[in-house]
Image (spheres, grey):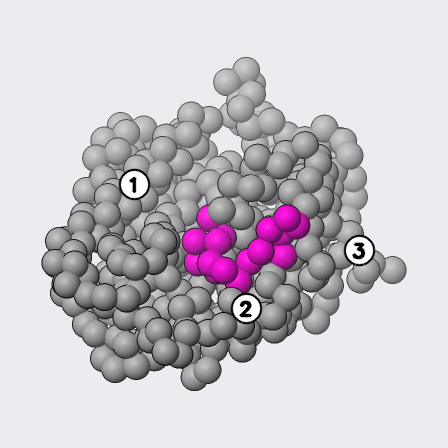
Amino acid sequence: MNTYASFDLERLTAVKTAQAARLLREVRDARIAGERPRVGPRPEIGASWDRMLASGVDPEHDFRSGVLSTDEVERRRQASPLRHVLPVLREGLLSVADVAQHIMVVADAEGRLLWREGNRSVLRMADGHGFEIGADWRENIVGTNGVGTALVARRPVQVFSAEHFVRTHHRWTCTGAPISDPRNGRLLGVVDISGPLDTMHPATLALVCSVAKLAEARLREAHLTALDRLRSVAAPVLARMDGRAVAVDGHGWTAAVTGMPPVDRIALPKSLADGRSWLPTLGMCTVAPLPGGWLLRLDEEERDVAGPGAGTRVVVDVAGPHRWTVAVTGSADCWTHELSPRHAELLYLLAVHRSGRTAAGLAADLFGDPARTVTVRAELSRVRRYLGGLLAHRPYRFHEDTDVQLLLPEDPSRLLPHSLAPAVLRARAVAEP
Protein backbone atom coordinates (compact mmCIF):
# COMPACT_ATOMS: atom_id res chain seq x y z
CA MET A 1 0.00 0.00 0.00
CA ASN A 2 1.20 3.50 -0.75
CA THR A 3 2.21 5.63 2.22
CA TYR A 4 2.40 8.77 0.10
CA ALA A 5 -0.28 10.94 -1.48
CA SER A 6 -2.25 9.31 -4.27
CA PHE A 7 -3.63 10.81 -7.46
CA ASP A 8 -7.11 12.29 -6.94
CA LEU A 9 -9.24 11.78 -10.04
CA GLU A 10 -12.08 13.91 -8.69
CA ARG A 11 -9.86 17.01 -8.69
CA LEU A 12 -9.57 16.94 -12.49
CA THR A 13 -12.08 19.78 -12.66
CA ALA A 14 -9.38 21.95 -11.13
CA VAL A 15 -6.55 20.96 -13.49
CA LYS A 16 -6.23 20.52 -17.21
CA THR A 17 -6.85 17.05 -18.52
CA ALA A 18 -3.58 17.03 -20.45
CA GLN A 19 -1.60 17.91 -17.33
CA ALA A 20 -3.30 15.17 -15.37
CA ALA A 21 -2.55 12.67 -18.14
CA ARG A 22 1.15 13.63 -18.11
CA LEU A 23 1.30 13.24 -14.34
CA LEU A 24 -0.28 9.81 -14.58
CA ARG A 25 2.23 8.76 -17.22
CA GLU A 26 5.03 9.71 -14.84
CA VAL A 27 3.38 7.73 -12.04
CA ARG A 28 2.88 4.68 -14.27
CA ASP A 29 6.38 4.75 -15.74
CA ALA A 30 7.93 5.04 -12.29
CA ARG A 31 5.89 2.08 -10.99
CA ILE A 32 6.90 -0.07 -13.96
CA ALA A 33 10.56 0.89 -13.45
CA GLY A 34 10.34 0.01 -9.76
CA GLU A 35 10.85 3.63 -8.71
CA ARG A 36 8.91 5.74 -6.24
CA PRO A 37 6.76 8.40 -7.99
CA ARG A 38 6.05 11.76 -6.37
CA VAL A 39 2.38 10.74 -6.03
CA GLY A 40 0.96 7.26 -5.93
CA PRO A 41 -1.83 5.82 -8.06
CA ARG A 42 -5.28 5.40 -6.61
CA PRO A 43 -5.44 2.16 -4.53
CA GLU A 44 -7.60 0.23 -6.99
CA ILE A 45 -5.34 1.24 -9.89
CA GLY A 46 -2.14 0.46 -7.99
CA ALA A 47 -3.51 -2.98 -7.10
CA SER A 48 -4.32 -3.63 -10.75
CA TRP A 49 -0.84 -2.53 -11.87
CA ASP A 50 0.68 -4.91 -9.35
CA ARG A 51 -1.37 -7.74 -10.85
CA MET A 52 -0.23 -6.78 -14.34
CA LEU A 53 3.43 -6.71 -13.34
CA ALA A 54 3.08 -10.10 -11.65
CA SER A 55 1.31 -11.68 -14.64
CA GLY A 56 3.69 -10.30 -17.27
CA VAL A 57 1.30 -8.11 -19.30
CA ASP A 58 3.30 -6.03 -21.82
CA PRO A 59 2.95 -2.37 -20.72
CA GLU A 60 3.98 -0.98 -24.11
CA HIS A 61 2.02 -3.02 -26.66
CA ASP A 62 -1.54 -4.27 -26.58
CA PHE A 63 -2.40 -7.92 -27.12
CA ARG A 64 -5.62 -9.11 -28.71
CA SER A 65 -6.98 -12.61 -28.35
CA GLY A 66 -9.31 -14.08 -30.94
CA VAL A 67 -12.70 -12.41 -31.42
CA LEU A 68 -15.70 -14.67 -30.90
CA SER A 69 -17.66 -15.75 -33.94
CA THR A 70 -21.04 -14.18 -34.64
CA ASP A 71 -22.78 -17.43 -33.69
CA GLU A 72 -20.93 -17.66 -30.37
CA VAL A 73 -21.72 -14.03 -29.54
CA GLU A 74 -25.41 -14.68 -30.21
CA ARG A 75 -25.34 -17.85 -28.11
CA ARG A 76 -23.85 -15.95 -25.19
CA ARG A 77 -26.36 -13.14 -25.59
CA GLN A 78 -29.29 -15.54 -25.40
CA ALA A 79 -27.81 -17.30 -22.36
CA SER A 80 -27.08 -14.08 -20.47
CA PRO A 81 -29.65 -12.63 -18.02
CA LEU A 82 -28.19 -9.23 -18.96
CA ARG A 83 -30.31 -9.27 -22.12
CA HIS A 84 -33.34 -8.64 -19.89
CA VAL A 85 -31.91 -5.39 -18.53
CA LEU A 86 -30.57 -3.92 -21.78
CA PRO A 87 -33.51 -1.44 -21.91
CA VAL A 88 -32.55 -0.18 -18.44
CA LEU A 89 -28.90 0.25 -19.45
CA ARG A 90 -29.78 1.96 -22.69
CA GLU A 91 -32.25 4.34 -21.07
CA GLY A 92 -29.81 5.29 -18.34
CA LEU A 93 -26.61 5.62 -20.36
CA LEU A 94 -27.01 5.82 -24.13
CA SER A 95 -28.34 9.38 -24.41
CA VAL A 96 -25.56 10.63 -22.15
CA ALA A 97 -22.97 8.55 -23.96
CA ASP A 98 -23.84 9.90 -27.39
CA VAL A 99 -23.79 13.55 -26.28
CA ALA A 100 -20.56 13.09 -24.30
CA GLN A 101 -18.85 11.23 -27.18
CA HIS A 102 -18.83 7.93 -25.36
CA ILE A 103 -19.96 4.42 -26.14
CA MET A 104 -21.73 1.93 -23.91
CA VAL A 105 -20.37 -1.60 -23.77
CA VAL A 106 -21.84 -4.64 -22.00
CA ALA A 107 -19.52 -7.59 -21.36
CA ASP A 108 -20.17 -10.99 -19.85
CA ALA A 109 -18.44 -12.41 -16.77
CA GLU A 110 -15.54 -13.63 -18.94
CA GLY A 111 -14.84 -10.14 -20.24
CA ARG A 112 -16.23 -10.79 -23.72
CA LEU A 113 -17.97 -7.77 -25.27
CA LEU A 114 -21.52 -8.79 -26.19
CA TRP A 115 -23.23 -5.45 -26.86
CA ARG A 116 -21.82 -2.11 -27.98
CA GLU A 117 -23.70 1.08 -28.83
CA GLY A 118 -23.21 4.85 -28.78
CA ASN A 119 -21.48 7.69 -30.63
CA ARG A 120 -20.64 6.55 -34.17
CA SER A 121 -17.28 8.31 -34.43
CA VAL A 122 -16.19 6.82 -31.10
CA LEU A 123 -17.33 3.37 -32.24
CA ARG A 124 -14.98 3.68 -35.23
CA MET A 125 -12.15 4.73 -32.93
CA ALA A 126 -12.88 1.78 -30.67
CA ASP A 127 -12.55 -0.60 -33.61
CA GLY A 128 -8.94 0.51 -34.00
CA HIS A 129 -8.22 -0.52 -30.41
CA GLY A 130 -9.88 -3.91 -30.67
CA PHE A 131 -12.77 -2.72 -28.51
CA GLU A 132 -15.31 -4.59 -30.63
CA ILE A 133 -18.09 -7.15 -30.29
CA GLY A 134 -16.71 -10.54 -29.28
CA ALA A 135 -13.35 -9.18 -28.11
CA ASP A 136 -11.72 -10.37 -24.88
CA TRP A 137 -11.14 -7.49 -22.44
CA ARG A 138 -10.10 -9.41 -19.38
CA GLU A 139 -7.53 -7.58 -17.29
CA ASN A 140 -4.83 -10.23 -17.78
CA ILE A 141 -5.25 -9.93 -21.56
CA VAL A 142 -5.37 -6.16 -22.20
CA GLY A 143 -4.23 -4.71 -18.87
CA THR A 144 -6.00 -2.33 -16.49
CA ASN A 145 -9.33 -1.23 -18.01
CA GLY A 146 -12.92 -0.46 -17.09
CA VAL A 147 -14.22 -3.90 -18.07
CA GLY A 148 -11.53 -6.32 -16.93
CA THR A 149 -10.55 -4.49 -13.75
CA ALA A 150 -14.19 -4.13 -12.65
CA LEU A 151 -14.57 -7.90 -13.14
CA VAL A 152 -11.55 -8.63 -10.95
CA ALA A 153 -12.30 -6.05 -8.24
CA ARG A 154 -16.07 -6.76 -8.30
CA ARG A 155 -16.69 -3.07 -7.79
CA PRO A 156 -17.13 0.04 -9.99
CA VAL A 157 -13.90 1.46 -11.35
CA GLN A 158 -12.91 4.44 -13.48
CA VAL A 159 -9.70 4.24 -15.50
CA PHE A 160 -8.36 7.50 -16.92
CA SER A 161 -5.59 7.88 -19.52
CA ALA A 162 -2.30 6.43 -18.23
CA GLU A 163 -4.08 4.59 -15.46
CA HIS A 164 -4.49 2.05 -18.25
CA PHE A 165 -1.50 -0.23 -17.85
CA VAL A 166 -0.91 -0.61 -21.60
CA ARG A 167 0.43 2.55 -23.26
CA THR A 168 -1.69 2.23 -26.42
CA HIS A 169 -4.84 2.75 -24.32
CA HIS A 170 -3.72 6.05 -22.77
CA ARG A 171 -5.91 8.15 -25.06
CA TRP A 172 -9.03 6.63 -23.52
CA THR A 173 -11.07 6.91 -20.37
CA CYS A 174 -13.43 4.12 -19.32
CA THR A 175 -15.80 3.55 -16.42
CA GLY A 176 -17.24 0.13 -15.62
CA ALA A 177 -19.52 -1.34 -12.97
CA PRO A 178 -20.21 -5.04 -12.35
CA ILE A 179 -23.72 -6.48 -12.41
CA SER A 180 -24.51 -9.54 -10.28
CA ASP A 181 -27.43 -11.94 -10.24
CA PRO A 182 -29.47 -11.12 -7.09
CA ARG A 183 -30.63 -14.75 -6.87
CA ASN A 184 -27.24 -16.35 -6.28
CA GLY A 185 -24.57 -13.64 -6.21
CA ARG A 186 -23.10 -14.85 -9.51
CA LEU A 187 -21.25 -12.18 -11.48
CA LEU A 188 -23.11 -11.64 -14.76
CA GLY A 189 -20.84 -9.07 -16.37
CA VAL A 190 -19.99 -5.39 -16.60
CA VAL A 191 -21.53 -2.30 -18.12
CA ASP A 192 -18.92 0.22 -19.27
CA ILE A 193 -18.87 3.74 -20.67
CA SER A 194 -15.74 4.60 -22.70
CA GLY A 195 -14.48 7.48 -24.80
CA PRO A 196 -11.55 9.76 -25.62
CA LEU A 197 -9.66 10.98 -22.55
CA ASP A 198 -10.68 14.62 -23.01
CA THR A 199 -14.34 13.63 -22.50
CA MET A 200 -13.69 12.30 -19.00
CA HIS A 201 -15.88 13.52 -16.13
CA PRO A 202 -15.67 12.29 -12.51
CA ALA A 203 -19.48 12.12 -12.26
CA THR A 204 -19.52 9.35 -14.88
CA LEU A 205 -18.54 6.83 -12.20
CA ALA A 206 -21.59 7.66 -10.06
CA LEU A 207 -23.84 7.49 -13.13
CA VAL A 208 -22.60 4.09 -14.30
CA CYS A 209 -22.74 2.71 -10.76
CA SER A 210 -26.33 3.91 -10.32
CA VAL A 211 -27.48 2.41 -13.62
CA ALA A 212 -25.81 -0.92 -12.78
CA LYS A 213 -27.65 -0.96 -9.44
CA LEU A 214 -30.88 -0.12 -11.24
CA ALA A 215 -30.29 -3.10 -13.55
CA GLU A 216 -29.76 -5.38 -10.54
CA ALA A 217 -32.96 -4.00 -9.01
CA ARG A 218 -34.84 -4.86 -12.20
CA LEU A 219 -33.47 -8.41 -12.07
CA ARG A 220 -34.54 -8.64 -8.42
CA GLU A 221 -38.01 -7.39 -9.33
CA ALA A 222 -38.31 -10.07 -12.01
CA HIS A 223 -37.19 -12.68 -9.48
CA LEU A 224 -39.81 -11.59 -6.94
CA THR A 225 -42.49 -11.64 -9.64
CA ALA A 226 -41.53 -15.23 -10.51
CA LEU A 227 -41.67 -16.17 -6.80
CA ASP A 228 -45.17 -14.68 -6.55
CA ARG A 229 -46.31 -16.84 -9.47
CA LEU A 230 -44.80 -19.92 -7.85
CA ARG A 231 -46.44 -19.04 -4.52
CA SER A 232 -49.88 -18.83 -6.13
CA VAL A 233 -49.41 -22.36 -7.48
CA ALA A 234 -47.82 -23.83 -4.34
CA ALA A 235 -50.08 -22.35 -1.63
CA PRO A 236 -53.15 -24.53 -2.40
CA VAL A 237 -50.93 -27.64 -2.59
CA LEU A 238 -49.28 -26.93 0.76
CA ALA A 239 -52.63 -26.18 2.40
CA ARG A 240 -53.72 -29.79 1.82
CA MET A 241 -50.52 -31.31 3.21
CA ASP A 242 -49.53 -32.52 6.67
CA GLY A 243 -45.99 -32.36 7.99
CA ARG A 244 -43.20 -30.11 6.82
CA ALA A 245 -42.84 -28.94 3.23
CA VAL A 246 -41.46 -26.00 1.28
CA ALA A 247 -41.87 -24.69 -2.26
CA VAL A 248 -38.73 -23.21 -3.82
CA ASP A 249 -37.69 -21.88 -7.20
CA GLY A 250 -34.82 -23.35 -9.21
CA HIS A 251 -32.27 -21.41 -7.16
CA GLY A 252 -33.71 -22.51 -3.80
CA TRP A 253 -35.50 -19.26 -2.95
CA THR A 254 -38.58 -19.95 -0.83
CA ALA A 255 -42.05 -19.18 -2.16
CA ALA A 256 -44.14 -20.87 0.55
CA VAL A 257 -43.77 -23.22 3.55
CA THR A 258 -45.93 -25.30 5.83
CA GLY A 259 -45.19 -26.95 9.16
CA MET A 260 -41.80 -25.26 9.57
CA PRO A 261 -40.35 -21.77 10.17
CA PRO A 262 -39.98 -19.73 6.97
CA VAL A 263 -36.48 -19.34 5.54
CA ASP A 264 -35.26 -17.13 2.72
CA ARG A 265 -33.45 -19.83 0.78
CA ILE A 266 -32.82 -23.57 0.73
CA ALA A 267 -29.48 -24.82 -0.56
CA LEU A 268 -30.10 -27.03 -3.60
CA PRO A 269 -27.74 -29.37 -5.44
CA LYS A 270 -26.74 -28.56 -9.01
CA SER A 271 -29.10 -31.23 -10.32
CA LEU A 272 -32.46 -31.94 -8.73
CA ALA A 273 -34.98 -34.47 -10.04
CA ASP A 274 -38.39 -35.87 -9.23
CA GLY A 275 -38.04 -38.49 -6.49
CA ARG A 276 -36.11 -38.53 -3.20
CA SER A 277 -33.01 -36.50 -2.46
CA TRP A 278 -30.86 -35.64 0.54
CA LEU A 279 -30.40 -31.91 1.08
CA PRO A 280 -27.71 -30.61 3.46
CA THR A 281 -29.96 -28.22 5.39
CA LEU A 282 -33.15 -30.30 5.36
CA GLY A 283 -32.17 -33.96 5.29
CA MET A 284 -34.02 -36.55 3.18
CA CYS A 285 -36.85 -35.05 1.13
CA THR A 286 -39.41 -36.12 -1.42
CA VAL A 287 -39.00 -33.87 -4.44
CA ALA A 288 -41.78 -33.02 -6.89
CA PRO A 289 -41.75 -30.49 -9.73
CA LEU A 290 -43.90 -27.38 -9.71
CA PRO A 291 -44.32 -24.80 -12.48
CA GLY A 292 -41.27 -22.61 -11.95
CA GLY A 293 -39.80 -24.58 -9.06
CA TRP A 294 -39.90 -27.57 -6.74
CA LEU A 295 -41.95 -28.93 -3.86
CA LEU A 296 -39.73 -30.36 -1.10
CA ARG A 297 -41.50 -32.57 1.47
CA LEU A 298 -39.35 -33.55 4.45
CA ASP A 299 -39.32 -37.22 5.41
CA GLU A 300 -40.31 -37.11 9.07
CA GLU A 301 -39.36 -40.74 9.79
CA GLU A 302 -35.77 -40.06 8.64
CA ARG A 303 -35.45 -36.71 10.29
CA ASP A 304 -31.82 -36.10 11.15
CA VAL A 305 -31.40 -35.93 14.92
CA ALA A 306 -27.72 -34.96 14.65
CA GLY A 307 -26.49 -31.41 14.35
CA PRO A 308 -27.30 -29.41 11.21
CA GLY A 309 -23.79 -29.92 9.87
CA ALA A 310 -23.54 -33.67 10.53
CA GLY A 311 -22.32 -35.54 7.44
CA THR A 312 -21.84 -32.29 5.53
CA ARG A 313 -18.65 -31.10 3.93
CA VAL A 314 -18.01 -27.44 3.13
CA VAL A 315 -15.21 -26.44 0.76
CA VAL A 316 -14.22 -22.76 0.78
CA ASP A 317 -12.19 -22.20 -2.39
CA VAL A 318 -10.16 -18.97 -2.43
CA ALA A 319 -7.27 -20.43 -4.44
CA GLY A 320 -8.07 -18.47 -7.61
CA PRO A 321 -7.27 -14.80 -8.22
CA HIS A 322 -10.69 -13.72 -9.53
CA ARG A 323 -13.34 -16.30 -8.64
CA TRP A 324 -14.11 -17.78 -5.24
CA THR A 325 -16.74 -20.32 -4.24
CA VAL A 326 -18.22 -22.26 -1.36
CA ALA A 327 -19.32 -25.81 -2.12
CA VAL A 328 -21.51 -27.90 0.17
CA THR A 329 -21.64 -31.68 -0.17
CA GLY A 330 -23.95 -34.10 1.60
CA SER A 331 -24.50 -37.70 0.59
CA ALA A 332 -24.38 -37.77 -3.23
CA ASP A 333 -25.59 -34.21 -3.75
CA CYS A 334 -23.67 -30.97 -3.80
CA TRP A 335 -24.12 -27.35 -4.68
CA THR A 336 -21.75 -24.45 -5.28
CA HIS A 337 -22.25 -20.74 -4.63
CA GLU A 338 -20.02 -18.07 -6.17
CA LEU A 339 -18.77 -15.63 -3.54
CA SER A 340 -18.57 -11.87 -3.66
CA PRO A 341 -15.22 -10.36 -2.60
CA ARG A 342 -16.55 -9.56 0.90
CA HIS A 343 -18.09 -12.99 1.41
CA ALA A 344 -14.87 -14.61 0.21
CA GLU A 345 -13.02 -12.69 2.93
CA LEU A 346 -15.57 -13.64 5.60
CA LEU A 347 -15.66 -17.36 4.81
CA TYR A 348 -11.87 -17.46 4.56
CA LEU A 349 -11.66 -16.01 8.07
CA LEU A 350 -14.27 -18.42 9.46
CA ALA A 351 -12.50 -21.37 7.83
CA VAL A 352 -9.20 -20.29 9.42
CA HIS A 353 -10.74 -19.63 12.85
CA ARG A 354 -12.77 -22.81 13.38
CA SER A 355 -13.39 -21.96 17.03
CA GLY A 356 -15.19 -18.82 15.86
CA ARG A 357 -14.84 -15.05 15.78
CA THR A 358 -16.95 -12.38 17.40
CA ALA A 359 -18.44 -9.61 15.30
CA ALA A 360 -15.84 -7.24 16.76
CA GLY A 361 -13.05 -9.67 15.91
CA LEU A 362 -14.23 -10.00 12.33
CA ALA A 363 -14.58 -6.23 12.05
CA ALA A 364 -10.96 -5.85 13.16
CA ASP A 365 -9.89 -8.55 10.69
CA LEU A 366 -11.74 -6.94 7.78
CA PHE A 367 -11.49 -3.22 8.45
CA GLY A 368 -8.93 -2.76 11.21
CA ASP A 369 -11.80 -1.30 13.26
CA PRO A 370 -13.54 -3.54 15.83
CA ALA A 371 -16.40 -1.03 16.09
CA ARG A 372 -17.74 -1.82 12.59
CA THR A 373 -19.87 -4.70 13.83
CA VAL A 374 -23.06 -3.55 12.10
CA THR A 375 -21.48 -4.07 8.68
CA VAL A 376 -20.16 -7.49 9.69
CA ARG A 377 -23.52 -8.67 11.02
CA ALA A 378 -25.32 -7.46 7.89
CA GLU A 379 -22.92 -9.35 5.60
CA LEU A 380 -23.11 -12.52 7.70
CA SER A 381 -26.89 -12.34 7.56
CA ARG A 382 -26.58 -12.47 3.77
CA VAL A 383 -24.15 -15.39 4.00
CA ARG A 384 -26.61 -17.33 6.18
CA ARG A 385 -29.21 -17.06 3.42
CA TYR A 386 -27.33 -19.71 1.45
CA LEU A 387 -25.41 -21.53 4.20
CA GLY A 388 -28.34 -21.66 6.62
CA GLY A 389 -27.77 -23.77 9.73
CA LEU A 390 -24.21 -24.62 8.72
CA LEU A 391 -23.18 -21.33 10.34
CA ALA A 392 -23.52 -20.76 14.06
CA HIS A 393 -23.14 -17.49 15.95
CA ARG A 394 -22.01 -16.18 19.35
CA PRO A 395 -19.31 -16.45 18.14
CA TYR A 396 -19.69 -16.75 14.38
CA ARG A 397 -18.33 -20.09 13.17
CA PHE A 398 -19.02 -23.14 11.06
CA HIS A 399 -21.10 -25.71 12.93
CA GLU A 400 -18.83 -28.05 14.87
CA ASP A 401 -20.21 -31.13 13.05
CA THR A 402 -19.30 -29.72 9.64
CA ASP A 403 -16.20 -30.89 7.79
CA VAL A 404 -14.60 -27.68 6.48
CA GLN A 405 -11.84 -27.58 3.87
CA LEU A 406 -10.06 -24.37 2.86
CA LEU A 407 -8.42 -24.21 -0.58
CA LEU A 408 -5.64 -21.58 -0.75
CA PRO A 409 -3.32 -20.38 -3.54
CA GLU A 410 0.09 -22.07 -3.66
CA ASP A 411 1.70 -18.65 -3.28
CA PRO A 412 0.29 -16.96 -0.12
CA SER A 413 1.05 -13.55 -1.63
CA ARG A 414 -1.71 -14.22 -4.22
CA LEU A 415 -4.42 -14.73 -1.61
CA LEU A 416 -7.56 -12.70 -2.44
CA PRO A 417 -5.62 -10.11 -4.47
CA HIS A 418 -8.50 -7.62 -4.33
CA SER A 419 -8.53 -7.55 -0.54
CA LEU A 420 -7.19 -4.80 1.71
CA ALA A 421 -8.41 -6.53 4.88
CA PRO A 422 -5.69 -6.45 7.59
CA ALA A 423 -6.04 -10.19 8.28
CA VAL A 424 -5.59 -11.01 4.59
CA LEU A 425 -2.61 -8.66 4.29
CA ARG A 426 -0.98 -10.44 7.24
CA ALA A 427 -1.56 -13.81 5.59
CA ARG A 428 -0.01 -12.60 2.33
CA ALA A 429 3.04 -11.33 4.22
CA VAL A 430 4.00 -14.95 5.00
CA ALA A 431 5.33 -15.18 1.43
CA GLU A 432 7.42 -12.03 1.65
CA PRO A 433 11.18 -12.41 2.20
Comparing labels 2 and 1, the label whose residue is closer to the camera: 2
Q: Give the range drawn in magenta.
A: 382-397
Q: Classify residue 219 as left or right of residue 413.
A: left
Query: Depth check: 22 or 149 in front?
Result: 149
Q: Please say whether residue 391 is one of the residues in the magenta stretch.
A: yes
Measured as percent of width and height from the top left, residue 54 is found at 67, 60
Residue 429 numbered mark, or none = 3
N-term mark: 2 or 1: 1
User: Given the image, on which type of amino acid does mark 2 rest?
Assistant: Gly
Q: For the residue labelled by badge 3, is the local secondary structure a helix, a strand or a loop?
A: helix
Q: Is mark 1 on a helix, strand or loop?
A: helix
Q: Mark 1 points at which residue?
A: 217
In this view, 194 is above or below 190? above
**Do the residues under discs 2 and 3 have CB atoms within 8 angstroms?**
no
> Residue 259, located in which quarter of the rendered image?
bottom left
Count neighbours of disc 1 (C-alpha within 10 A) and say few if under 14, some if 14 to 19, many if 20 or more: some
Disc 2: which residue: 307
- Residue at mark 2 to residue at mark 1: CA–CA distance: 37 Å
Q: Residue at x 34, y 52 (%)?
A: 262
Q: Is residue 351 visible?
A: yes
Helix, strand or loop at label 2? It is loop
Q: Residue 4 carries which label?
A: none
